Image: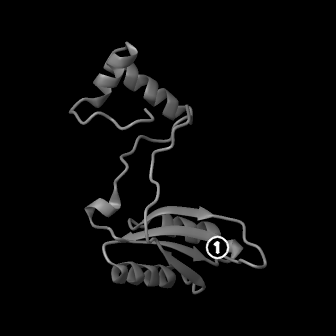
Amino acid sequence: MQQDLPITSRPFHILAGKVGVSEDEFLAQIRSLRDRGIIREVNAVLRHRRIGYQANALCVWQVDEGRIDEVGNLFAGLTEVTHCYERESCPEWQYNLYTMVHAVTREACEKRIREMSELSRTENYLVFYSTQELKKITMRYF
């Protein structure tokens, strides 16, 4: 489950065969792991640059501590945002909310970031654009 799924109509059937169980047993085990909180979800990883999303920006936001959950949940619900994290700030760096925003063009990305600022009533932010993707892999734990 830590590798790419086979491109087939029944990928779990193939994986189940590799470990010697039925597809139903394999899917039941995945559900059990999810229900116990061991795995969160099974997702596809989209190579966004390959489909035309060339503007990828790390945005750092200075959000009042009392509003961090509100603003974080707002940003996390936006389709253009793929990552949304709270981080500790310090006197030298007062930004405490981090988002990755993706768009087809830089102009579209900047427009969406301005909209995020307006929606959240958060005016203090910085934007850092990706210039080159150096590594993108799925995390492997075992």
The colour scheme of the drawn protein is one colour
In the rendered image, the vertical position of residue 49 relative to residue 6, given as above or below:
below
Residue in view at x 69 percent, y 73 percent: 66
User: Which residue has dot 1 on it?
Assistant: 67
Classify residue 112 by image quadrant.
bottom left
Percent coordinates x, y for residue 131 in the rendering: 44, 72
Percent coordinates x, y for residue 45 in the rendering: 37, 49
Residue in view at x 32 percent, y 77 percent: 105
Q: Secondary structure at mark 1?
A: helix
Q: Viewed as shown, does residue 113 lie left or right of 53?
A: right
Could you say which is closer to the camera, residue 84 or residue 46? 46
Residue in view at x 43 percent, y 32 percent: 1
Looking at the image, which residue sits at the far right? 91
Percent coordinates x, y for residue 79 in the rendering: 38, 65
Residue type at mark 1 is Arg
Could you say which is closer to the camera, residue 95 or residue 47? 47
Point out the image quarter for the C terminus.
top right
